[in-house]
Amino acid sequence: MQEILIDISKLFDSIFMICFFVVFNQSIKKAFYKGQISGRKFNIQTFITNPVILFFASYFIAFTIETAVYVALGGDVNVAKNQVSKTTMYSYVAILMGCIVFALLIIFFAYRLGKKLEAPNISLMIFLYLMFAVIFGLSGTDTAIETDEYAAVTFGVNLFKNMVLVIAIYLLYQLVQNTLSKLTDKKRFINAKMFLIPPLVFLLSYYFFNYLTYIYGGYAANIVLNILSLMILFLFIWAFDIIMKNIKATDDAVNAKDEIKMLSVEVMEALANTIDAKDKYTNGHSIRVADYSRMIAKKMGLSEEECENIYNMGLLHDIGKIGVPNEIINKPSRLTDSEFDVIKTHPEMGYSILSKIKSKPDLANGARWHHERYDGKGYPDNKSGEDIPLEARIIAVADSYDAMTSNRSYRKYLPQDTVRSEIEKNIGTQFDPEAAKCMLMIIDEDKEYKLRENIEL
């Protein structure tokens, strides 16, 4: 009876081991293998660095440490090979050191393979290794079938454990691994402590206390520990499934937000091009003004969000021209006073249009006040100094710069030194001093004069 149960138990152990190797290999391949190395080389590397191999390596090291400790205490090496040291404290130290060596081997080989595969997030590679090591650790502690009296019970416990661990492997692959594979392409920060510390602490604690209960606590205590450990394993899988799905959901939400943001910018750029199309000599004007405004804002040290908001305001700063008659906009000769008065209505008209966008109430600022002057002689509200919103002061400099560096029906774009002189001359009168000085810095950096309209007359 005993021999039959031992053979059946070994058969199920072999089935579990095959399942373990296959799923572990597929998990690493699916999550981290991006085709950098040949499939054959990949299989060899994952086999060598498999938690099963590391387990036996660390077991040998732990046994060597324990034997060395026992011999150092004057014990008989032959006795040490067959029983645990009777010097309890040193035995505990040897067991604990063996556990630590095992954990370090897991982390080391996972790290090395992660570097080899150029895994975007190596902490997730180590996490996957640790989870498989936890499963294998639980599988590798079957109680021996020593007598016919306990053979059936022991066989049942070991068979049940193998079945439960096969389910755990399946759930780890289906729930955790499939989500993990979607995160590994992300060059984003993953909280390594959240993933690495729980399975690592569990692994160390389990090996240590499993050995102690098996040797000192007896058969019943060992079974209770293993049942509790199986429950913790499934709790791990459930918890990490939730954590990674939440991370994935956050990524999806961020991506959706970025897509909406990109769509909004594309719509605004299309609208800006539509406005500029009213005048063949202002083609691309709004997008250039938006670009220059963002460059000035960056030079002024504004945040990325503020720079993007200013870019959006620059795109739509001339939207009020949509209400100005084409014959005035495209008039080749000098405008009359009455015609210029019509042109001067476009800031208020643009403000009226954009102020209806409740989700971006500041978007209208650039449209209304980009023709105000720092000395208060601008329009439409004769604002001066810092009473003019910062965004409008920045756009005013960018707008004037593009006007001077663009072709017109009556002239070609102005030379760069002339443009620079005009901006420098009007600092503190027409232009905000800080914004204008930042524009001068940008001009000085543009050695080849690329920041201009690139259509030759």
Image (cartoon, rainbow, N blue to C red):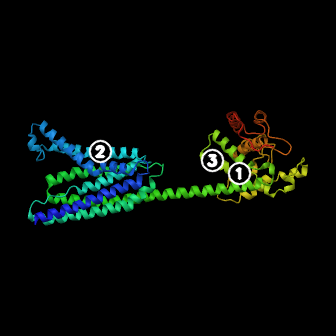
10 Å crowding of disc 1: few (<14), some (14-19), many (20+): many
In the rendered image, the quadrant that contains the N terminus is bottom left
**Element class at badge 3:** helix
> What amino acid is found at the position of numbered circle 1 in the picture?
Leu
**Element class at badge 2:** helix
Please say whether residue 232 is visible from this viewpoint.
no
On the image, the x and y values in percent for residue 72 come to 13, 36
Q: Quadrant of residue 361?
A: bottom right
Disc 3 to disc 2, C-alpha distance: 48 Å
Query: Is 253 or 171 nearer to us in this picture?
Result: 171
Residue labelled with disc 1: 315
Q: Are marks 3 and 2 in contact (CB under 8 Å)?
A: no
Q: Nearer the viewer, mark 3 or mark 1?
A: 1
Please say whether residue 419 is visible from this viewpoint.
yes
Q: Are marks 3 and 1 in contact (CB under 8 Å)?
A: no
**Element class at badge 1:** helix
On the image, the x and y values in percent for residue 384 come to 76, 43
Left or right of 83? Residue 401 is right
Q: Earlier in the sequence, mark 3 or mark 1?
A: 3
Q: Residue at x 37, y 53 (%)?
A: 28
Residue labelled with disc 3: 306
Query: Is 173 or 217 nearer to us in this picture?
Result: 173
Left or right of 51? Residue 143 is left
Left or right of 76? Residue 400 is right
Left or right of 209? Residue 319 is right
> What amino acid is found at the position of numbered circle 2 in the picture?
Leu
Residue labelled with disc 2: 105
Q: Earlier in the sequence, mark 3 or mark 2?
A: 2
What numbered label is drawn on residue 24?
none
